[in-house]
Image (cartoon, helix red, strand yellow):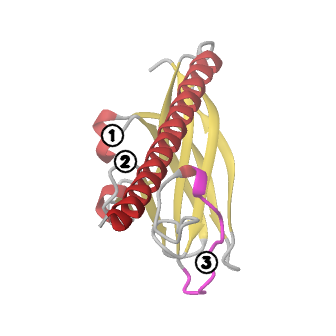
Amino acid sequence: MKKLVLPLLILGFIFASCQKEEVSSLTELDGVASKVKIEQEKSEDESCSEDGKCETAFGRYCDCASLNKCFSDFGFNRWGWSVELDKPGEYDFGFYAGAGQCDLSKGTPVGGVKVIFKDDGTVSVDDFYMKDGFVLKEFHFYAGDTEVPIGKNGKFTVAPGQYYNEGDTDGDGKVYVILHSVVCGDY
């Protein structure tokens, strides 16, 4: 019996020490991530102090709900729109800042951009404009065959850092577009 207890104690000690190591590594990682986030928030505040308050803004085409789908329609807990362009052409999008839950009455129109969907399936943006008192600080856009982009992990995402532009690759004559920006100004 003594021969069996000693190996079990050693095995238990090894497992327990590995468990503690893993937990402390996660804690350190979370600490680093929190620190980075705080530093990023601080630098954003400092960089926008001369331009006023900064807000997230998303692009929307027309007042037609059928073409503008809120991210929550896809199960995301984040606001913003995926816009279906059903044929090639030039489309004028408006930027709306702070329109939580895709509610335009909560948002502020801050500017816009022209989206160009060409016959060859490519998509580009042109003619940015900002309303008086607002400055564009960041811009990301997605254009592709799925309503929201597929992230690096193979799952659907609405994270602006994972947006890409592939245009209409399946040749069906339609594309989905998401326009994200950070806009600073006097709200």
Question: Does residue 103 appear in this view?
Answer: no
Q: Callout 3: helix, strand or loop?
A: loop
Residue lying at the far front in this picture: please name it. 2
The residue labelled by disc 1 is 100
Q: Callout 1: helix, strand or loop?
A: helix
| Nearer to us in this view, 100 or 159 | 159
Q: Does residue 143 lie above or below 55 as drawn?
A: below
Residue 59 counted in the magenta span: no
Q: CA distance from mark 1 to mark 2?
A: 6 Å
The residue labelled by disc 2 is 79
Residue visible at 59% across and 51% down in the picture? 161
Q: Amino acid at mark 1?
A: Gly
Residue 168 counted in the magenta span: yes
Residue visible at 63% across and 22% down in the picture? 43
> Quick check: marks 1 and 2 in contact, CB under 8 Å?
yes
- Bin the neighbour count of mark 2 within 10 Å (Cα to Cα): few under 14, some 14-19, many 20 and up: some
